[in-house]
Image (cartoon, rainbow, N blue to C red):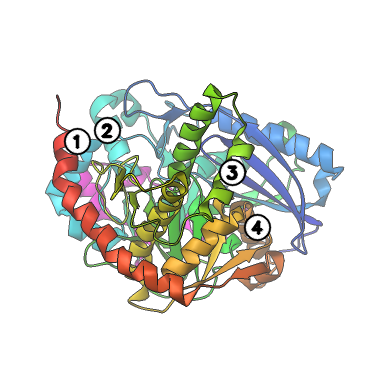
């Protein structure tokens, strides 16, 4: 493919909005523009978005980005995408959305998940897809539409993910990539094809699923109407891209087997690159197809990482407001400084970080947060440290699953929490691993999409170029003595969770 242009355009369509980022071909982040959109919650457990909001966000952010960077549309070599995963947007044969998209956070299809589990069983679906059965995934959401909105289902030509809808608007093609296909609970992970066995068991038409390709697949080019809407040049190559988590792995330079990264955000996950899927006997972790289309990205996600810290910070702010108040940045600085006043182990105070239930590794929606071992001698510093340590202990459960097949002595850290050096030191000490902090800790997702664009149109031979795009800035070394202390507390952390499981389920019972 003959490609001209000096820049790669990446769109990261998240839950709260779209972030358009412009990269030069040598990996420099040139400019960015964000455009917010809303999520509606029509009933408890429901979460929906209007796909027209996604398109409006892409159009507006593209125009504003090019204008602000003084870059002409003809200078864009290719455009690609990362986006929220596990959605369900039914469209007709002309690509018109038939209803709002049911997004990843929507949990309405529990009954449909039970239908699939009765039909095939949890372990069979896990072995095919690399994922547990859950109402988080697209399959049960589409079955819910069949059961509750039969007219919509009857008129559905394709079920699309967020980025797939935008790619259709740009090119007129119905496609998806392997990573987003994994997020449907319908994709044969190793065969890299849709599973007729699962589609039959859940009772949906496999013909509604778009053709799936590697994330580097060049779908086509920007069509005339889309060019007029977005400000892009007609004929600009469009590369499909991938799901946000898998793009983040590439942006973090996890592109070789045995490498690993952690995202420290509201939620947190650890993922690796592997030549083969990692099927955990206890079904604690799951698998994506890697952005390169050949490797795999075994992963484990906990619900409340940065959320646990944010919860504590917000409670402190509430107390501070009674005494005159302080802003979030001031509280962050104060809490980080406070941690140094507490020794590792926080005086034998443990925090269970399950404020929103738990996904991997516990898979327990009833789990709840708790301070264990609290007594009158504990200080505020101990409580802050225990929250940060609790997240580290929980992530270690995930990491230990992957360590069965490798040492993982180095882990790349990205996400907003990766700016907190105190927290990174705690993680390094708990995991006994070197923490590598790259230059860009909060743009890894869009950088992964940009790399898809570059590889997809032949500007880069492979994904190894990302190491020059996002090099390691500095390293956090683990301390052996502190690791020894944490090694004593880690089994107690797990025992504390197990001991409370019956309490959690009883608390969830109606009063």
Q: Secondary structure at mark 4?
A: helix
Which residue is painted at 39% across and 37% down in the image? 105
Dot 2, crowdedness within 10 Å: few (<14), some or many (≥20)?
many
Q: Position of residue 344 (x, y in %)?
A: 44, 62
Report the residue marked by disc 2: 144
Q: Looking at the picture, does residue 266 appear above or below residue 282?
A: above
- For marks 2 and 3 on the same chain, the one whose residue lies earlier in the sequence: 2
Query: Mark 2 to mark 3: distance in Å?
Result: 47 Å
Q: Secondary structure at mark 3?
A: helix
Report the residue marked by disc 1: 111
Query: Mark 3 to mark 1: distance in Å?
Result: 46 Å
Q: Nearer the viewer, residue 201 or 336?
A: 336
Is 213 covered by the magenta stretch? Answer: yes
Residues in magenta? 190-219
Instruction: Kindly check if marks 2 and 1 are in contact, taking CB atoms under 8 A apart as contact.
Output: yes
Q: Nearer the viewer, residue 287 or 281?
A: 281
Q: Nearer the viewer, residue 270 or 461?
A: 270
Q: Give the side of residue 175 with respect to residue 345, left or right.
A: right
Which residue is painted at 76% across and 40% down in the image? 65
Q: Secondary structure at mark 2?
A: helix
Instruction: Kindly check if marks 4 and 2 are in contact, taking CB atoms under 8 A apart as contact.
Output: no
Report the residue marked by disc 3: 334
Q: Quadrant of residue 505?
A: top left
Which residue is painted at 42% across and 56% down in the image? 389
Instruction: Kindly check if marks 3 and 1 are in contact, taking CB atoms under 8 A apart as contact.
Output: no
Report the residue marked by disc 4: 453
Q: Is residue 277 visible?
A: no
Name the quarter where the N terminus is drawn: bottom right
Q: Looking at the picture, does residue 510 appear above or below residue 180?
A: above
Dot 3, crowdedness within 10 Å: few (<14), some or many (≥20)?
few
């Amino acid at each position: 493919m003959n490609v001209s242009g000096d820049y790669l355009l990446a769109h990261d369509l998240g839950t709260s909005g779209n972030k358009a980022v412009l990269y030069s071909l040598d990996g420099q982040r040139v400019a960015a523009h964000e455009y917010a959109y809303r999520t509606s919650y029509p009933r408890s457990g429901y979460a929906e978005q209007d796909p027209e909001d996604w398109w409006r966000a892409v159009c507006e952010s593209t125009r504003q980005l090019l204008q602000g960077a003084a870059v002409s549309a003809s200078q864009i070599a290719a455009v690609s995408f990362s986006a929220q995963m596990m959605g369900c947007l039914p469209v007709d044969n002309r690509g018109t959305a038939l209803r709002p998209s049911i997004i990843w956070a929507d949990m309405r299809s529990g009954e449909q998940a039970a239908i699939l589990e009765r039909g095939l069983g949890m372990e069979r679906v896990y072995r095919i897809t690399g994922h547990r059965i859950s109402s988080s995934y697209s399959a049960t959401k589409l079955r819910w539409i069949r059961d509750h909105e039969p007219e919509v289902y009857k008129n559905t030509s394709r079920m699309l993910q967020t980025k797939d809808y935008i790619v259709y608007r740009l090119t007129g093609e119905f496609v998806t990539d392997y990573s987003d296909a994994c997020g449907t609970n319908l994709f044969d992970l190793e065969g890299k094809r849709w599973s007729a066995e699962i589609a039959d068991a859940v009772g949906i038409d496999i013909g509604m699923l778009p053709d799936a390709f590697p994330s580097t697949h060049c779908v086509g080019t920007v069509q005339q109407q889309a060019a007029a809407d977005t400000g892009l040049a007609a004929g600009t190559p469009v590369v499909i891209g991938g799901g946000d988590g898998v793009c983040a792995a590439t942006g973090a330079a996890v592109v070789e087997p045995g490498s690993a990264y952690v995202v420290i955000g509201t939620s947190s996950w650890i993922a690796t690159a592997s030549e083969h899927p990692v099927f955990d006997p206890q079904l604690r972790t799951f698998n994506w197809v890697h952005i390169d289309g050949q490797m795999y990205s075994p992963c484990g996600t906990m619900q409340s990482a940065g959320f646990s810290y944010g919860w504590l910070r917000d409670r402190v702010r509430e107390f501070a407001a009674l005494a005159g108040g302080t802003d979030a940045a001031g509280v962050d600085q104060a809490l980080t400084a406070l941690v140094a006043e507490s020794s590792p182990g926080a005086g034998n105070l443990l925090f269970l970080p399950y404020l929103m239930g738990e996904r991997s590794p516990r898979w327990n929606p009833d789990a709840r947060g708790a301070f264990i071992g609290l007594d009158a001698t504990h200080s505020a510093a101990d409580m802050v440290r225990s929250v940060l340590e609790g997240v580290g202990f929980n992530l270690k459960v995930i990491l230990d699953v992957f360590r069965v097949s490798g040492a993982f002595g180095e882990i790349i850290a990205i996400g907003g929490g990766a700016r907190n050096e105190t927290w990174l030191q705690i993680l390094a000490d708990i995991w006994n691993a070197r923490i590598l902090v790259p230059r860009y800790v909060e743009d890894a997702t869009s950088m992964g999409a940009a790399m898809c664009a570059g590889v997809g149109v032949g500007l880069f031979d492979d994904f190894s170029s990302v190491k020059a795009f996002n090099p390691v800035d500095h390293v956090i070394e683990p301390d052996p003595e502190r690791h020894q202390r944490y090694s004593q507390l880690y089994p107690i952390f797990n025992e504390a969770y197990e001991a409370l499981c019956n309490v959690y389920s009883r608390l969830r019972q109606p009063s």
